[in-house]
Amino acid sequence: DTEVTQTPKHLVMGMTNKKSLKCEQHMGHRAMYWYKQKAKKPPELMFVYSYEKLSINESVPSRFSPECPNSSLLNLHLHALQPEDSALYLCASSQDGPVGATNEKLFFGSGTQLSVL
Amino acid sequence: DAKTTQPPSMDCAEGRAANLPCNHSTISGNEYVYWYRQIHSQGPQYIIHGLKNNETNEMASLIITEDRKSSTLILPHATLRDTAVYYCIVRVNFGNEKLTFGTGTRLTIIP
Protein backbone atom coordinates (compact mmCIF):
# COMPACT_ATOMS: atom_id res chain seq x y z
CA ASP A 1 0.00 0.00 0.00
CA THR A 2 1.73 3.15 -1.22
CA GLU A 3 -1.22 5.47 -0.86
CA VAL A 4 -1.84 8.61 1.08
CA THR A 5 -5.58 9.03 1.53
CA GLN A 6 -7.15 12.43 2.10
CA THR A 7 -10.73 13.15 3.06
CA PRO A 8 -12.89 14.87 2.12
CA LYS A 9 -11.98 15.46 -1.53
CA HIS A 10 -14.02 18.66 -1.63
CA LEU A 11 -15.13 20.97 1.18
CA VAL A 12 -17.15 24.16 1.20
CA MET A 13 -17.26 26.08 4.44
CA GLY A 14 -18.33 29.44 5.77
CA MET A 15 -16.01 31.80 7.57
CA THR A 16 -17.54 30.94 10.95
CA ASN A 17 -17.42 27.17 10.50
CA LYS A 18 -15.05 24.69 12.10
CA LYS A 19 -13.98 21.79 9.94
CA SER A 20 -11.16 19.26 9.76
CA LEU A 21 -9.16 17.74 6.94
CA LYS A 22 -7.91 14.20 7.40
CA CYS A 23 -4.93 12.34 6.01
CA GLU A 24 -3.97 8.70 6.47
CA GLN A 25 -1.07 6.49 5.38
CA HIS A 26 -0.16 2.90 6.17
CA MET A 27 3.38 2.79 4.80
CA GLY A 28 5.00 3.08 8.22
CA HIS A 29 6.20 6.58 7.40
CA ARG A 30 7.16 8.74 10.35
CA ALA A 31 7.18 12.16 8.67
CA MET A 32 3.96 13.80 7.51
CA TYR A 33 3.42 17.12 5.78
CA TRP A 34 0.70 19.64 4.97
CA TYR A 35 1.02 21.76 1.85
CA LYS A 36 -1.28 24.47 0.49
CA GLN A 37 -1.61 25.05 -3.25
CA LYS A 38 -3.37 27.98 -4.88
CA ALA A 39 -4.51 27.69 -8.48
CA LYS A 40 -1.64 27.69 -11.00
CA LYS A 41 0.95 28.01 -8.22
CA PRO A 42 3.37 25.46 -6.76
CA PRO A 43 2.59 23.76 -3.44
CA GLU A 44 3.69 25.71 -0.37
CA LEU A 45 4.80 23.93 2.79
CA MET A 46 2.71 24.60 5.89
CA PHE A 47 3.67 22.03 8.55
CA VAL A 48 5.94 19.04 9.03
CA TYR A 49 5.50 16.36 11.68
CA SER A 50 8.32 14.01 12.55
CA TYR A 51 7.60 11.05 14.81
CA GLU A 52 4.27 12.65 15.74
CA LYS A 53 5.86 15.90 16.89
CA LEU A 54 5.56 19.19 15.04
CA SER A 55 9.01 19.95 13.64
CA ILE A 56 8.32 22.71 11.12
CA ASN A 57 5.64 25.44 11.13
CA GLU A 58 6.09 27.80 8.20
CA SER A 59 4.56 30.77 10.06
CA VAL A 60 1.05 29.55 9.32
CA PRO A 61 -1.85 31.58 10.83
CA SER A 62 -3.37 30.08 13.97
CA ARG A 63 -6.71 29.52 12.22
CA PHE A 64 -4.96 26.43 10.83
CA SER A 65 -4.24 23.91 13.59
CA PRO A 66 -2.45 20.64 12.76
CA GLU A 67 -2.69 17.49 14.80
CA CYS A 68 -0.91 14.14 14.53
CA PRO A 69 -2.80 11.71 16.79
CA ASN A 70 -0.65 8.73 15.75
CA SER A 71 1.95 7.79 13.19
CA SER A 72 -0.64 6.99 10.51
CA LEU A 73 -2.94 9.98 10.84
CA LEU A 74 -2.62 13.69 10.27
CA ASN A 75 -5.40 16.22 10.71
CA LEU A 76 -5.70 19.88 9.85
CA HIS A 77 -8.32 21.71 11.92
CA LEU A 78 -9.80 24.80 10.32
CA HIS A 79 -11.53 27.65 12.14
CA ALA A 80 -12.54 31.16 11.12
CA LEU A 81 -10.99 30.88 7.68
CA GLN A 82 -10.97 33.66 5.11
CA PRO A 83 -11.96 33.42 1.44
CA GLU A 84 -8.27 33.76 0.50
CA ASP A 85 -7.66 30.44 2.28
CA SER A 86 -9.51 28.70 -0.54
CA ALA A 87 -6.98 26.30 -2.08
CA LEU A 88 -6.00 22.67 -2.60
CA TYR A 89 -4.62 21.23 0.63
CA LEU A 90 -2.16 18.41 0.11
CA CYS A 91 -0.90 15.88 2.60
CA ALA A 92 2.31 13.94 2.12
CA SER A 93 4.40 11.40 4.00
CA SER A 94 7.96 10.14 3.92
CA GLN A 95 10.01 7.56 5.68
CA ASP A 96 11.99 10.02 7.86
CA GLY A 97 14.96 7.73 7.97
CA PRO A 98 18.27 8.41 9.71
CA VAL A 99 20.78 10.98 8.54
CA GLY A 100 22.31 9.70 5.34
CA ALA A 101 19.22 7.86 4.18
CA THR A 102 19.18 7.82 0.42
CA ASN A 103 15.54 7.44 -0.43
CA GLU A 104 13.54 10.15 1.29
CA LYS A 105 10.89 10.62 -1.34
CA LEU A 106 7.53 12.10 -0.45
CA PHE A 107 4.24 10.41 -1.27
CA PHE A 108 1.37 12.82 -1.79
CA GLY A 109 -2.37 12.41 -1.50
CA SER A 110 -4.75 13.82 -4.09
CA GLY A 111 -5.68 16.71 -1.85
CA THR A 112 -8.78 18.38 -0.46
CA GLN A 113 -10.17 21.22 -2.57
CA LEU A 114 -11.35 23.79 -0.03
CA SER A 115 -13.67 26.69 -0.79
CA VAL A 116 -14.31 29.31 1.90
CA LEU A 117 -17.41 31.43 1.35
CA ASP B 1 14.39 32.34 -2.72
CA ALA B 2 14.23 29.78 -5.53
CA LYS B 3 17.12 27.34 -5.63
CA THR B 4 16.25 26.09 -9.10
CA THR B 5 15.41 27.69 -12.43
CA GLN B 6 13.22 25.97 -15.02
CA PRO B 7 11.60 27.13 -18.26
CA PRO B 8 7.92 27.92 -17.60
CA SER B 9 6.60 25.75 -20.41
CA MET B 10 7.63 23.25 -23.09
CA ASP B 11 5.94 21.21 -25.79
CA CYS B 12 6.96 17.76 -26.99
CA ALA B 13 5.54 15.53 -29.70
CA GLU B 14 4.03 12.25 -28.58
CA GLY B 15 6.49 9.39 -28.89
CA ARG B 16 9.53 11.64 -28.83
CA ALA B 17 11.92 12.12 -25.93
CA ALA B 18 11.07 15.03 -23.64
CA ASN B 19 14.14 16.76 -22.20
CA LEU B 20 13.41 19.08 -19.28
CA PRO B 21 16.30 21.29 -18.12
CA CYS B 22 16.93 22.64 -14.64
CA ASN B 23 19.58 25.03 -13.35
CA HIS B 24 20.70 24.77 -9.72
CA SER B 25 23.95 26.71 -9.70
CA THR B 26 24.00 27.20 -5.90
CA ILE B 27 23.51 23.54 -5.02
CA SER B 28 25.39 22.38 -1.92
CA GLY B 29 27.49 19.24 -1.68
CA ASN B 30 24.91 17.41 0.41
CA GLU B 31 21.88 18.37 -1.66
CA TYR B 32 20.22 15.94 -4.00
CA VAL B 33 18.31 16.82 -7.16
CA TYR B 34 14.71 15.60 -7.05
CA TRP B 35 12.10 15.64 -9.77
CA TYR B 36 8.38 15.49 -9.13
CA ARG B 37 5.47 16.01 -11.46
CA GLN B 38 1.89 17.07 -10.90
CA ILE B 39 -0.82 16.00 -13.26
CA HIS B 40 -3.90 18.22 -13.24
CA SER B 41 -6.06 17.79 -10.12
CA GLN B 42 -3.69 15.29 -8.52
CA GLY B 43 -0.99 15.49 -5.87
CA PRO B 44 2.67 15.66 -6.92
CA GLN B 45 4.28 12.37 -7.85
CA TYR B 46 7.90 11.45 -7.27
CA ILE B 47 9.83 10.68 -10.46
CA ILE B 48 13.53 10.31 -9.72
CA HIS B 49 16.39 11.77 -7.71
CA GLY B 50 20.18 11.78 -7.77
CA LEU B 51 23.29 13.22 -6.18
CA LYS B 52 25.96 13.30 -8.87
CA ASN B 53 25.67 10.17 -10.97
CA ASN B 54 23.18 9.76 -13.75
CA GLU B 55 20.12 7.80 -12.70
CA THR B 56 17.47 5.81 -14.55
CA ASN B 57 14.28 4.17 -13.44
CA GLU B 58 11.11 2.94 -15.09
CA MET B 59 9.76 6.46 -15.46
CA ALA B 60 12.69 8.58 -16.56
CA SER B 61 16.41 9.28 -16.69
CA LEU B 62 18.23 12.02 -14.80
CA ILE B 63 21.42 13.50 -16.20
CA ILE B 64 23.42 15.68 -13.80
CA THR B 65 26.35 17.73 -15.09
CA GLU B 66 29.77 17.07 -13.62
CA ASP B 67 29.79 20.39 -11.76
CA ARG B 68 26.25 19.62 -10.51
CA LYS B 69 25.03 23.07 -11.48
CA SER B 70 22.37 21.79 -13.84
CA SER B 71 20.44 18.67 -14.70
CA THR B 72 18.08 17.29 -17.34
CA LEU B 73 15.11 15.02 -16.85
CA ILE B 74 14.48 12.78 -19.83
CA LEU B 75 11.17 11.07 -20.54
CA PRO B 76 12.28 8.69 -23.30
CA HIS B 77 8.99 8.15 -25.16
CA ALA B 78 6.51 10.80 -24.10
CA THR B 79 2.82 9.95 -24.04
CA LEU B 80 -0.22 12.18 -23.60
CA ARG B 81 -0.38 11.06 -19.97
CA ASP B 82 2.97 12.76 -19.36
CA THR B 83 1.33 16.18 -19.75
CA ALA B 84 1.94 17.75 -16.33
CA VAL B 85 3.89 20.36 -14.39
CA TYR B 86 7.41 19.09 -13.67
CA TYR B 87 9.24 20.35 -10.60
CA CYS B 88 13.00 20.23 -10.11
CA ILE B 89 13.92 20.51 -6.42
CA VAL B 90 17.20 20.46 -4.53
CA ARG B 91 17.03 19.04 -1.05
CA VAL B 92 19.26 17.56 1.61
CA ASN B 93 18.36 13.93 1.79
CA PHE B 94 17.55 13.03 5.34
CA GLY B 95 14.69 12.88 7.72
CA ASN B 96 11.95 15.42 7.56
CA GLU B 97 13.88 18.08 5.68
CA LYS B 98 11.44 20.32 3.87
CA LEU B 99 10.71 19.85 0.18
CA THR B 100 10.32 23.31 -1.38
CA PHE B 101 8.73 23.57 -4.81
CA GLY B 102 9.75 26.13 -7.42
CA THR B 103 7.53 27.27 -10.26
CA GLY B 104 8.19 24.19 -12.43
CA THR B 105 7.84 23.53 -16.16
CA ARG B 106 4.45 22.93 -17.71
CA LEU B 107 5.07 20.14 -20.24
CA THR B 108 2.45 19.61 -22.92
CA ILE B 109 2.63 16.49 -25.06
CA ILE B 110 1.28 17.15 -28.54
CA PRO B 111 -0.52 14.30 -30.34
Image (cartoon, coloured by chain):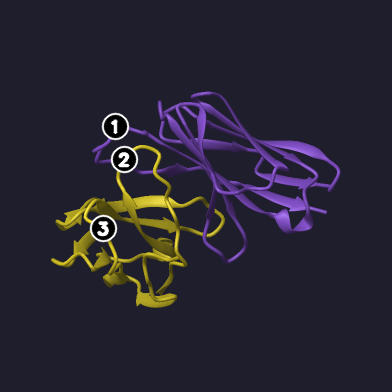
Chain colours: A purple, B yellow
N-terminal-most mark, 2 or 3? 3
Q: Describe residue A42's horizontal placement relative to residue A8 as left or right.
A: left
Q: Which chain hosts label 2?
A: B
Tell me the residue that label 2 is attached to.
B94
Tell me the residue that label 3 is attached to.
B28
Q: In percent of the image, x 28 and y 41: which residue is there?
A: A103
The amino acid on which the numbered mark 3 sits, given as a three-letter code, is Ser
Could you tell me which quadrant the N terminus of chain A lies in?
Answer: top left
Q: Which chain hosts label 3?
A: B
For the residues tagged 1 and 2, is the chain the same?
A: no
Q: Describe residue B75's horizontal placement relative to residue A93 as left or right.
A: left
Distance in Å between CA atoms under marks 3 and 1: 20 Å
Label drawn at residue B9:
none
Which element carries disc 1, helix, strand or loop?
loop
| Farthest front residue in view | A59
Vertical position of residue A49 compared to residue B41: above or below: above
Q: Residue A56 or B48: which is nearer the viewer?
A: A56
Could you tell me which quadrant the C terminus of chain A lies in?
Answer: bottom right
Label drawn at residue A98:
1
CB under 8 Å between callouts 1 and 2? yes
* Quadrant of the rendered image containing residue A8: top right
Vertical position of residue B83 compared to residue B110: above or below: above
Residue B43, percent across and down?
51, 50
Distance in Å between CA atoms under marks 2 and 3: 14 Å
Distance in Å between CA atoms under marks 1 and 2: 6 Å
Residue B49, percent across and down?
27, 52
Q: Residue A56 or B14: which is nearer the viewer?
A: A56
CB under 8 Å between callouts 3 and 1? no
